[in-house]
């Protein structure tokens, strides 16, 4: 079994000047960014189907205190049919980028660390596993721990509450 190296997935604001180091540039927002003309933005794709639902986006309101719950709900949404297909296309684009350059996920969100783009980037990076595993990245969404973001079959990150709860169920 040959391990695939982690995918090079980056997150940037759509308002930042494009860079030659960006590789493939994909907008991952459901709504077109304010103040930008479509013909002026250098994009390879607009992946609306991987964006959070309007309801989830409205509930979240980019409140960092709600980010952990947002991430958990968003990963649940990514398990849906259209979202899985769109996530699979992003995964394929990222995997092909290993030869051509990175995949840069673009968002209008100011706080990149607490954005859906950050959740997507982490999911895409972590879903690279043994080559024989195959499947779309969303096939792995249910394996991502909402607490620490680790792929649960590989173990939780140190200090993860979910890990302690599972140990208690297993050993208790």
Image (cartoon, grey):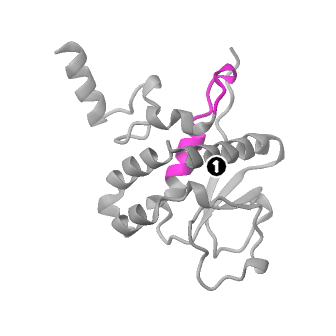
The x, y position of residue 131, in whole percent, is 69, 23
Q: Position of residue 74 (x, y in %)?
A: 43, 51
Query: Which quadrant holds residue 31?
Result: bottom right
Instruction: Name the residue rendered at 74%, 46% in the picture.
Output: 93
Was residue 6 drawn as part of the magenta stretch in this picture?
no
Residue assigned mark 1: 86
Residue 122 shown in magenta = yes
Looking at the image, how many numbered discs can be counted on the residues? 1
**Viewer-side residue, 12 vs 40:** 40
The answer to whether residue 104 is above or below residue 131 is below
Q: Percent x, y for residue 69?
A: 32, 52
- Residue segment shown in magenta: 119-135
Q: Residue at x 25, y 21 (%)?
A: 167
Does any portion of residue 8 appear in the rendered image?
no
- 98 and 142: which is toward the camera: 142
Residue that protrudes farthest toward the bottom in the picture: 35
Q: Is residue 71 visible?
A: yes
Relative to 70, 108 lies left or right: right
| Secondary structure mostly seen in the magenta stretch | helix
Q: Is residue 91 above or below residue 128?
A: below
Could you tell me which quadrant the N terminus lies in?
top right
Give the residue displayed 79% in from the left and 79% down from the top. 39
Question: Residue 166 placed where, x, y %?
Answer: 27, 24
- Nearest the camera: 136 or 151? 136
Please identify the residue farthest to the right as the structure is shown.
100
In which quarter of the view is residue 36 placed?
A: bottom right
Is 60 above or below relative to 40? above
């Amino acid at each position: 079994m040959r391990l695939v190296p982690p995918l090079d997935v980056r997150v940037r604001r759509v308002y930042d000047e494009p860079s030659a180091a960006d590789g493939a540039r994909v907008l991952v927002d459901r709504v077109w960014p304010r103040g930008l003309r479509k013909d002026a933005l250098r994009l390879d794709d607009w992946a609306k189907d991987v964006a959070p639902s309007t309801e989830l986006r409205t509930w979240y309101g980019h409140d960092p205190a709600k980010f952990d719950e947002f991430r958990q709900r968003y990963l649940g949404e990514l398990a849906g049919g259209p979202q899985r297909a769109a996530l699979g296309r992003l995964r394929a684009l990222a995997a092909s980028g290993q030869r051509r350059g990175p995949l840069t996920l673009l968002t209008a969100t100011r706080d990149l660390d607490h954005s859906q783009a950050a959740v997507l980037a982490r999911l895409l990076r972590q879903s690279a596993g043994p080559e024989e595993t195959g499947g779309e990245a969303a096939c792995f969404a249910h394996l991502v721990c909402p607490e620490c973001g680790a792929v649960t079959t590989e173990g939780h990150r140190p200090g993860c509450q979910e890990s302690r709860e599972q140990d208690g169920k297993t050993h208790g």
